Image (cartoon, rainbow, N blue to C red):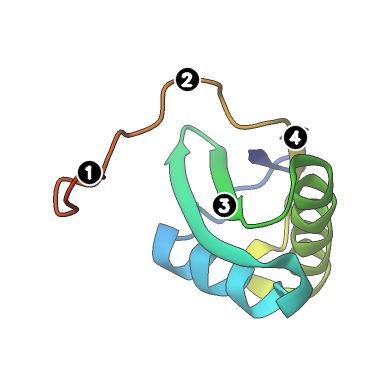
Amino acid sequence: MVTLAPRGRYSAGEPRAAEISDVMWVFATPEAQLEHVSIRSGACRIHLGFYSRLDSAAAAEATTAICRRALASSPLLRGWEVAALGPAPEGPGPGPDPGLDPAP
């Protein structure tokens, strides 16, 4: 999980979630093994959830690298910075896919 916040007095407005997702995919390398980016924005905050096939430590490192490249290079994210980095919340998984037959 990554939270972005405006740096200083930023008043240009928040980019749309789809635009942010596109930017993150542009800066993701194949080595990041990224599967999905989830985005939720609120009052001057953008919360991103990165889902990767890597183990936790490697996924955190890859996520940080993606965000650094995006913040340094994307005009869309000019004026934003990483406010918080953290693991995904713990909790029960979504359960079995209802479209799959259970194992015999």
Residue where numbered disc 4 is placed: 83
Under circle 1, the secondary element is loop
Residue 91 is tagged as: 2
Q: Nearer the viewer, mark 3 or mark 1?
A: 1
Residue under the point 55% across and 21% down: 90
**Badge 1: few (under 14), some or many (20 or more) residues near its Cα, within 10 Å?**
few
Under mark 4, the amino acid is: Ala
Q: Looking at the picture, does residue 91 appear above or below residue 69? A: above
Under circle 3, the secondary element is strand
Q: Nearer the viewer, mark 4 or mark 1?
A: 1
Mark 4 and mark 1: Cα distance apart in space: 47 Å
Residue under the point 56% across and 46% down: 48
Q: Residue 2's image quarter?
A: top right
Under mark 1, the amino acid is: Pro
User: Closer to the camera, 64 or 80?
Assistant: 64
Mark 3 and mark 1: Cα distance apart in space: 30 Å
Mark 3 and mark 2: Cα distance apart in space: 15 Å
Q: Is residue 69 visible?
A: yes
Q: Earlier in the sequence, mark 3 or mark 4?
A: 3
Q: From the image, which quarter does the C terminus lie in?
A: top left
Under circle 4, the secondary element is strand
